[in-house]
Image (tube, grey):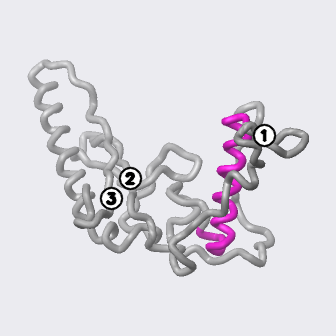
Amino acid sequence: QDKSFANADLERVLEPSPERVEPQCALYGRCGGCQYQHMPLALQRQWKRQHVLDALQRIAGLAPGADGATALAGQTLETLVQSTIGAGEDFAYGYRSKVTPHHDGPRSRKGGPVEVGPIGFREHGRRRLVDVTECPIASTAINRALPAARDEAVGKALAKAEVITAARAAGERRRKPKGATLLLREADAGVET
């Protein structure tokens, strides 16, 4: 907790807003990869714009003066930050052309086999990872490429853990294997990893 704000977890919605919609992702609310699926697309875009306005005021110090003008060419923040532009009204899902799931380093629990844990995004407000095998806001091409990218990441992590284990057995001082971030980006030539 910081002195200027407090953190809290939503336990349940007592009275939903009339604008509230049902998120399409089964992990929504746990996965920290997105926060707006409970809002209609137009409202999502308004909130995203408001986040930019808030950041410019809080971080960049561009708070409007008494006359409403900022230090940037005499424009108000309201005119400086225009409406969020999207790919159209049918693109609340399947639009994201880049995802960066993560995994922690491989571990062995109680003498068991070395395993790589969840591959996905941080749990909302926590350091734990949520295993994400498919992401509704990611493009179809990224979702098709994700299983192979996950398998490749697991293979590399386990191979590295094997090298470190062998080096330790030979008396070398080695740190535990670290996790990694996968980058999947859709481009004209397909999905790059």
Outermost residue, front direction? Answer: 73
Left or right of 115: which side holds 165? Answer: left
Foreground disc of the pair 1, 3? 1
Report the amino acid beneath label 2.
Thr
Foreground disc of the pair 2, 3? 3
Tell me residue 40's x, y (percent).
65, 75
Tell me residue 164's x, y (percent).
17, 31
Most prominent secondary structure in the magenta stretch?
helix
In this figure, which residue is indicated by the disc labeled 2? 100
Q: Are marks 1 and 2 in contact (CB under 8 Å)?
A: no
- Give the quadrant of the C terminus: bottom left
How many residues crowd mark 3 within 10 Å: few (<14), some (14–19), many (20+)?
some
Q: Are marks 2 and 3 in contact (CB under 8 Å)?
A: no
Residue located 51% across and 52% down the image = 123
Residue located 50% across and 57% down the image = 33
Residue located 30% across and 63% down the image = 187
Q: CA distance from mark 2 to mark 3?
A: 9 Å
Q: How many marks?
A: 3
In this figure, which residue is indicated by the disc labeled 3? 185
Residue located 37% across and 49% down the image = 102
* Dot 1: element: loop
Q: Earlier in the sequence, mark 1 or mark 3?
A: 1
In this figure, which residue is indicated by the disc labeled 1? 63
Report the amino acid beneath label 3.
Arg
Left or right of 79: which side holds 160? Answer: left
Report the amino acid beneath label 1.
Ala
Q: Which residues are magenta?
A: 37-61
Is the residue 101 above or below the residue 84 in the image?
Answer: above
- Give the quadrant of the N terminus: top right
* Dot 3: element: strand
Is the residue 131 above or below the residue 56 in the image?
Answer: below
